[in-house]
Amino acid sequence: NAGIPYNTDLGIEITGLHEAGVELLMPWQDRFGGSRHKGHMHGGVIAALLDAACGLSMVVFTGRGAPTIDLRTDFLRGTGATDLRARGQIVRVGRSLANVDATVHDAAGRHVASGRAVFSLGHQDPPAAR
């Protein structure tokens, strides 16, 4: 979770790295419920996981974090009480903006959501400590 308190609070764990991004796991928590029917995940939790996958992919690829200036989330299916996995992938890093895609799958491997984040490179964090 690269020391990001919000990611830590959500229980997000980095499970893998690849040359252009990260793989994450977010274990189910009862407080993620999003409807009056128990066991349905709130869409905001899924969007937060997409943002984390994109943002942490930026850190892996550039060595620095950057603020998200746009996040598009496409919800493809509802999901119940299940762990989720996300994979972020750098699409393009330019002079001032970067685009990163991410996907979210449930524990059964079903594609739950896709997203794209745009980051402002003019406002990057200092290089990550190594």
Image (cartoon, grey):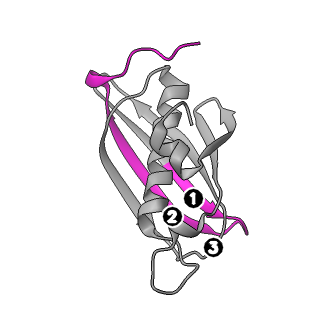
- Write the residue at 44% across / 22% down: 64
Q: Which mark is residue 127?
A: none
- Count neighbours of disc 1 (C-alpha within 10 A) and say few if under 14, some if 14 to 19, many if 20 or more: many
Q: Tell me where the magenta segment starts and ends, as one range.
A: 102-130
Who comes first in sequence, dot 2 or dot 3?
3
User: Which amino acid does the dot numbered 3 rest on?
Assistant: Ala
Q: Secondary structure at mark 2?
A: strand
- Count neighbours of disc 2 (C-alpha within 10 A) and say few if under 14, some if 14 to 19, many if 20 or more: many
In the rendered image, the vertical position of residue 19 relative to residue 75, given as above or below = above
Task: Tell whether label 1 touches label 3 (CB within 8 Å).
Answer: no
User: In terms of depth relative to the viewer, which is nearer, 64 or 33?
Assistant: 33
User: In terms of depth relative to the viewer, which is nearer, 35 or 48?
Assistant: 35
User: Which amino acid does the dot numbered 1 rest on?
Assistant: Val
The residue tagged 1 is 104
Who comes first in sequence, dot 3 or dot 1?
3
User: In terms of depth relative to the viewer, which is nearer, 30 or 109?
Assistant: 30
How many circles with numbers are drawn on the protein? Answer: 3
The residue tagged 2 is 113
| Disc 3 to disc 1, C-alpha distance | 14 Å
Which of the image's four quarters has the N terminus? top right
Is 14 positioned to the left or the right of 96 in the image?
right
**Where is residue 123 drawn, in percent x and y?**
27, 24
The residue tagged 3 is 81
- Write the residue at 46% across / 75% down: 34
When asked about the image quadrant of residue 126, the answer is top left
When asked about the image quadrant of residue 26, the answer is bottom right
User: Which amino acid does the dot numbered 2 rest on?
Assistant: Ala
